[in-house]
Image (cartoon, rainbow, N blue to C red):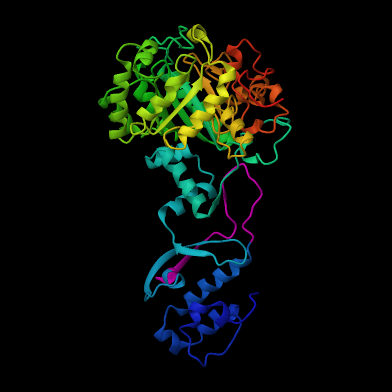
Amino acid sequence: MINGNFHDRLKVTARYLPNHFPVCLPEQLPQKLQQEADLLATVPFLVELAEVELLLEQKKTIETCQEQSNEYQIVPGTELVQVSWSGLSELLNGHEIVPEQKEELLLIVPQEPGKRSLISIADNNSLLALKIVAEHLDLRKLAAELDVTVAELQGVLRFGTAKGILAAPVSRIARPPGFARQVSGFEDSLHASAFTLQWHITQSCELNCRHCYDRSQRKDVSLVEGTALLDQFYTFCDHYHVRGQVTFTGGNPILHPQFERLYRAAHERGFKTALLGNPVNRTILEKIIEIQMPEFYQISLEGLEPHNNYIRGNNHFQRSIKFLDLLKELDIYSMVMLTLTKANLDQVLPLAEMLRDRVDSFTFNRLAMVGEGASLVSVEPETFRGFLVRYQKAAEENPIMRRKDNFFNLLSYQNNQFFTGGCTGYGCGAAFNFVSVLPDGQVHACRKFPSPIGDLNHQDFISIYESETAVKYRSGSSSCFQCEIKPVCGGCLAVSHGFNKAPLTSLDPYCFKEK
């Protein structure tokens, strides 16, 4: 029962009542109004207004919090109410309007206890979101029936969650028990809400870069194999309650003869998409956009023009600059990645300044001395911290510069500054919120060094992710266990491997934390 009389609780309804109307409990008001023929002749919508306002008051006591679930759930107290007068929700939301006799479906969304529920006309997206969850509909089947994409239906569920009528399942992607000695304060870094599949669909590439980490001969993934892989990845993301992103790469992914069909297949399954590749022409980009705007298109530059062209080939620098201008013109988020070596260390900041108005994001990866990269010279570890300091200072004035290397967080720790997401948003993401799949179905924890965790020709994504080998990789190096910031760092396993160290037991040779 609601405490107080209707003047206190049903204030909108009370405005239409004469001064001599007898005081009663809020629950009694709708029934009493039905006996007031003269009043209803003047205000015919008053009974329904009182009933709906009473319902809003009653829902103030509903507890909307729920235990974590493995599936979407309708928030307790969410209710659809059919009324015969339109405009009631506007009245209850403070608008001056005269209701009309016309059927309308209202949506009531409960708030935290003590607060009045929200009320609005039920929109199509809310109705569809409620139907999907209430009837446990399969998104892929429903997408085919409605002739829409899975991505659109996933958007409907996210809309329902944002509106407060649905409770989304919690991600099951988590660091393993015993991941680090210190996890307090880093709880958000122990679970990931998104998962990236870096998909090498071909080894074909028109470049011959001096630091390429893999020139092995592997057959392209076929269209049949590719769509089957995407179906598996869909099942994986659904099982772990994460948003999936497919980042197409190679080689040069555009050179795959079925690239467009594979890209479309990823879009149709609701995945975000991105590209790691080389400069291409406008026609190709426009076809990509027509299917789905990528989250980003990343290319690589290795320093200023002479050094870059030495590493990546004649005229590569100028072609890349023109391509970045094209990405900007087409409103595609652009990223430039540099592989940091001893030879280009002093070119990083000048290059970042040159790119200031041309690119959305610029960052670097340290050289992993693997494949062709073994012939190049890495930055001397004792100079690395000083470089990070200079880079970070420049980044304060240059908005395109990103702090991707995990050791920026070590620098922040030493200077009592805020942490970044590190390499993949959660420190080292190898086999945690990220895996790499090669054209032949081999799955690696990280593409920058040999880190096989499974084979999709004989295993499925879930069993590979849950394998003992994958767990070891996402646990990171045991040498980092005692470190206070391991959840946002972990060094780089690929760099350790390149220095002929055991990546799962050795300390990253660039770590400058005081022992």
Q: Quadrant of residue 282?
A: top left
* Chain part drawn in magenta: 63-89
Q: In this rendering, would 18 be left or right of 428?
A: left
Check the image and report above or below for 29 versus 245: below
Question: What residue lies at 30% left-to-right and 28% top-to-bottom?
Answer: 285
Question: What residue lies at 50% left-to-right and 47% top-to-bottom?
Answer: 132
Q: Which is more toward the observer, 193 or 374?
A: 374
Residue 7 in the image: state x and y as whole percent. 55, 82
Q: In which quarter of the image is residue 222?
A: top left
Q: Can residue 130 be seen in this view?
A: no
Q: Can residue 306 be seen in this view?
A: yes
Asked whether 87 falls inside the magenta stretch, the response is: yes
Quadrant location of the C terminus in the rendered image:
top right
Residue 449 in the image: state x and y as whole percent. 55, 14
Quadrant location of the N terminus in the rendered image:
bottom right
Q: Which is more toward the observer, 117 or 239?
A: 117
Residue 385 in the image: state x and y as whole percent. 57, 25
Q: Which is more toward the observer, 441 or 274?
A: 274
Residue 506 in the image: state x and y as whole percent. 68, 17
Check the image and report above or below for 79 versus 457: below
Asked whether 169 falls inside the magenta stretch, the response is: no
Residue extending farthest bottom? 20
Residue extending farthest left? 283
| Tally of numbered discs | 0
Q: In which quarter of the image is residue 192?
A: top right
Question: What residue lies at 46% left-to-right and 36% top-to-bottom?
Answer: 140
